Amino acid sequence: MVEYVKHGEILLAIIVSPDQAEPGIQFLTPDDFSQQLACMRHPVGKLVEPHVHNPAPRAVHYTQEVLFIRRGKVRVDFYDGARTYLSSRVLQSGHVILLAAGGHGFLMLEETEMIEVKQGPYIGEKDKTRFQGIAAEQVRIRGEHD
């Protein structure tokens, strides 16, 4: 299952659940995203021909990141570009999330191991603006079918 988290027409995130297993290759991101995300499932014996990637200059204006939840449980809080809280989701082992736009924060609900992939080079604290998150009583956790 794939959930597209939106605020109006703005795609904030793409959440891929551990049971996503369609055959073949499904790109989940629009072609113009600076970070591309796809799900792949191939049968035994499928050959992906050897290849190299050609130089292709690209301009990245905002950092998009992908988190792989290896173990644990984490609450993701979503904010719009003006830092207004929107909603939250709970992710656990096997989930993958691409954070595409707006703001986000995290609360570890269990000891959690994640792998993060994002564009570089990393420019330290100049790469982000931190802000005060919401209080616990304001959290609205949405399910995949809300």
Image (tube, grey):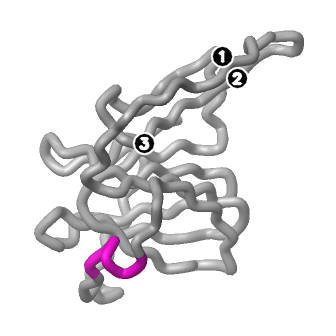
Q: Is residue 133 magenta?
A: no
From the top left corner, tell me how far across and down residue 48 is, in percent. Answer: 74, 14
**Vertical comparison of 35 with 53: above or below:** below
Cβ atoms at labels 1 and 2 below 8 Å apart: yes
Element on which disc 3 rests: loop
Give the number of the disc on residue 41. 2
144 displayed left or right of 108: left
Q: Which residues are magenta?
A: 124-129
Q: Nearer the viewer, mark 3 or mark 2?
A: 3
**Mark 3 or mark 1, whichever is nearer to me:** 3
Amino acid type, residue under disc 1 in the picture: Pro
**Image marks 3 and 1: residues in contact by CB distance under 8 Å:** no
Out of 15 and 44, give the one closest to the viewer: 44
How far is mark 3 from mark 2, CA to CA? 20 Å
Query: Which comes sooner in the sequence, label 3 or label 2?
Result: 3
Give above or below for 58 relative to 26: below
**Residue at x 54%, y 60% (from the top left corner):** 91
As displayed, is residue 133 above or below residue 65?
Answer: below
| Residue assigned mark 1 | 23
Residue 107's x, y, as percent?
48, 79
Judge from the rendering whether residue 33 lies leftward or rightward of residue 73; answer left or right. left
| Residues tagged 3 and 2 counted as in contact (Cβ below 8 A) | no
Instruction: Please give the residue where the numbered disc 3 appears in the rendered image.
Output: 35
